[in-house]
Amino acid sequence: MNTAARTIDPTSDAAIAASVTPRPIEEIGDRLGVPAAALYRYGPDKAKIALDFARKAEAKADGRLILVTAINPTPAGEGKTTTTIGLGDALARAGKRVAIALREPSLGPVFGSKGGATGGGHAQIVPMQDINLHFTGDFHAISAAHNLLAATIDNHIYWGNALDIDTRRINWRRVVDLNDRALRSVVVGLGGPGNGFPREDGFDITVASEVMAIFCLARSLEDLEERLGRMVVAQNRARQPITAGQLKVTGAMTALLRDAFQPNLVQTLEATPAVVHGGPFANIAHGCNSVMATRTALGLADYVVTEAGFGADLGAEKFLDIKCRQAGLTPSVVVIVATVRALKMHGGVAQKDLGAENVAAVSAGTSNLVRHIENMKAFGLPAVVAINRFTGDTAAEIDAIRAACAAVGASVHLCSHWADGSAGAVGLAEEVAALAAGPSAFRPLYASELPLLAKIEAIATRIYRAGAVAVEPGALRKLGEFEAQGHGDLPICMAKTQYSFSADPTRRGAPEGFVLPVRDVRLSAGAGFVVALCGDVMTMPGLPSRPAAEDIFVDETGFIGGVF
Amino acid sequence: MNTAARTIDPTSDAAIAASVTPRPIEEIGDRLGVPAAALYRYGPDKAKIALDFARKAEAKADGRLILVTAINPTPAGEGKTTTTIGLGDALARAGKRVAIALREPSLGPVFGSKGGATGGGHAQIVPMQDINLHFTGDFHAISAAHNLLAATIDNHIYWGNALDIDTRRINWRRVVDLNDRALRSVVVGLGGPGNGFPREDGFDITVASEVMAIFCLARSLEDLEERLGRMVVAQNRARQPITAGQLKVTGAMTALLRDAFQPNLVQTLEATPAVVHGGPFANIAHGCNSVMATRTALGLADYVVTEAGFGADLGAEKFLDIKCRQAGLTPSVVVIVATVRALKMHGGVAQKDLGAENVAAVSAGTSNLVRHIENMKAFGLPAVVAINRFTGDTAAEIDAIRAACAAVGASVHLCSHWADGSAGAVGLAEEVAALAAGPSAFRPLYASELPLLAKIEAIATRIYRAGAVAVEPGALRKLGEFEAQGHGDLPICMAKTQYSFSADPTRRGAPEGFVLPVRDVRLSAGAGFVVALCGDVMTMPGLPSRPAAEDIFVDETGFIGGVF
């Protein structure tokens, strides 16, 4: 045991969260017009919204949708989640009927180095320890459904392999919701005939499962099961695709996901309703919370604030071209979060020098921010800039940001919701509400009818500003196969570094004219997109040399302290 | 999809369960004096009993404890769970304040061939689909805690291996709560230096985890964490044991288990309270529900009916010598469940002939039942026989059982709770209540101070009636090592076939004078027992050629049908 460090830091997120008594979840439901009978409670302060009620709400879905995204971030992130929460709280403070729609945390980062995903300071959702650990069990349900299918594939082969599955060409890996690098590449089926046929396999983290992506895009349990059935899990010896549907366990998988599919309701520290549901990877998947949750929130609230993973080049583009397109959503406003430190970094300052004032570097770094603002115009959407303020930021640095943004018609709001809660995001909320009042001119970047390669090129040249796209021959051939199989109308899910517009994480600022390499492409037939891999994609993280898990403890009152 | 079979059989357990509307869980809590404030609800009909309330209740734990066990079973089982539920319902019908204490089902058998574990017919606990699937997430929490430790071991080695762990001697495998034979024996850490050091590994089903055994034996969260810390996970190059405590994640594991550690409250179809919590394997672990649940139930009810896995030679012996000893429990009465069919089998009848009346075979087969009755006397406990009645059983066959039991002073009750609910177990309940009224003369079979080998011999010769025990030399050496390390006072956890008193599953009836082979022994230092392996032990089942999963579905109302 590691009892030496078992004291609770009074300035920690956990301590701040513990200083506020959450309202009963029935009261939070009532704010959105959800009757207690439609709440499936998990203790006093968490609930699922009953599916039949949620489906009635999502059929309406007429609230205003506000997307919070960011510049290309530093490894620590720019504060999208806290800004989403702060903005939501500020809209509620202004008397608006509002709901926040966020992703659920994964256990991997919680025990690794990134920590939780419930905001921070005075902009948090609670109960933060619960949400960061098992929450309502959704990810466990997704893991179980995923792994049931995996076990079924090997079991099918064991009992005669009627589908003639080629054991060298099984692409359905197993999952665990932890960071465990030793499982990235494994050989299974060892130990003799009773254990099956040895073959190469591997584990991904649960959030990388196509089941997770489907869970977040399905519109109903029927849609969920149909999508599960379409997933391609292997090829047979004739190189034909084998789908999950052919293995006959999509009914059981749907049974495992039935309860999880209902959106989760919690609250912020200021008792603003938050619908927290799903959490697909932002690289090989689309990186936003579930369609069920977003649409349910839109049916219950006048304003819904949500976020998308990574920077706007990846997160916002996929939110708009994949999620909004599939789910029939029309966003109204985009908020782009930036920090002075990150803009300095985009202006060429080294990590160790980020603490010192450097107006010139900030000014140079705004090239990154300005391009994201302009990119949102390509979708017909107004963009507002939120500066997630740190105490070291200077007035001159802020002025440099204002000047650059004014040149492209975007206003800048200094936000201190981390320190001040809703009071720190009042100005941002006012402008967002004003912009959301008008009609939305949202349009996706590209038409579904475009060939797959043309879609990749549209994203690369219009959003990333690449000069050209270099697709590996094997990937090009696969794109043709996908089109021949009838998947040509799917949107593209880009898997690229989040740190640069290019595929090179060291190219900060606003590079242009570069060649974007597409090494491989993958079909996610159930989720409904084609993944374009522009570099190495890590689908199973590792733990750091000193994992956050070492600091986590339960004290004698049952309070969970440590990393949070 | 497998939609052809998507109809609900009106005679199925699921349909019978659906015909009864469960009472609100607050009403069930109220029957036991649990206030609504001490219920952490999971929807309308499931709850956890808040730990602080449960701890107050378990400190009292003064109810009468009734153990339901069985003869050596047939593969289908003799009906211990339905008898536990039927007896509990019948005691409630007689006006007693009663609670049932059961194990939680594992997902593996649910999707395999055995099906659910919530009783059957009119003796069920509900909501049966929920309990059989994720329930309140306890097993998922145990899986996550187990696998976090596994990931930490490989991560420790990856970052320099300060503990000098011998990668050939890591005994901490990984777990998944599914039947997945392809994972029994694997190689992990492949794919290059970034993924760690390749080594042999394997997966067990979650119920086989020592974390599960600890979860079911711990008396508090502090005790839980201390036990986790004592678990031996590997040896270093000097062959010294490496414990989980040295890896510094027992705090995080305890945080993952905090909520799960609270006992779950549900109800029978007749609204009798049922505390359903934990579910360790009955071979390499002790096979009973959690001490927290049993003791909490004993603190809240006047009568607690519980069960133990497998037949009385394994399940009851381990319940009495491991669980009762560790938890300070004093049982009052043992109910031994038998079926006419199984007794016929013990009398030498082949599977295909079990349907025909065969009084002589039943009479011969009672040797198995009689020995179990006599064995209970070795623990100072009165035994009652419950015949789980099937329609084909004849009066002459029943008379043969009565005669054999009368000779050893045990009465026989014909029970039809499966068909009739509590009305089918009235006589059994009357006798059990009468026997429980007196003082208990319970004593464990052996003293803790006996050497480990002498304990094994006591079980083998006095319970199994072996003539001798043959311990492999390597196992004998390990017993000496365990004693030298200070574990000599631990009880023994026998891992033996459930189908025979001997280690040979084909030896039915009441064999005696045989040699019991002990192939290997294992230390479960956290759970607090030494496992003696008398044959192959399967810690990861496989799926059958036609898994039950293929029949499971969710209909348009959200009802889960299929195997149940």
Image (spheres, coloured by chain):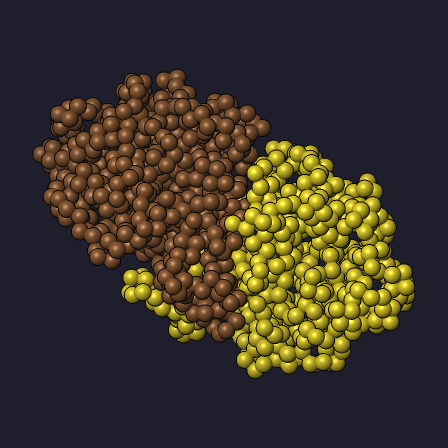
Chain colours: A brown, B yellow
Instruction: Note whether A25 is above or below B188 in the view shown.
Output: above
Determine the residue located farthest toward the front in the rendered image. A484
* Residue drawn at 39 percent across, 19 percent down: A96
x, y percentage for residue A45? 51, 33
* Residue drawn at 82 percent across, 53 percent down: B415
Q: Is residue B352 left or right of residue A537?
A: right
The answer to whether one can see residue B133 in this image is: no
x, y percentage for residue B551? 59, 52
Depth check: give the residue in front, A193 or A548.
A193
* Residue drawn at 74 percent across, 69 percent down: B351
Q: Is residue A121 left or right of residue B480?
A: left
Q: Quadrant of residue A133?
A: top left
Q: Is residue A504 left or right of residue B381?
A: left
Mark count: 0
Depth check: give the residue in front, B260 or B242.
B260
* Residue drawn at 19 percent across, 25 percent down: A410
x, y percentage for residue B437? 83, 50
Quarter of the figure with the N terminus of chain A: bottom left
Instruction: Note whether B219 is above or below B286 in the view shown.
Output: above
Depth check: give the residue in front, A175 or B518.
A175
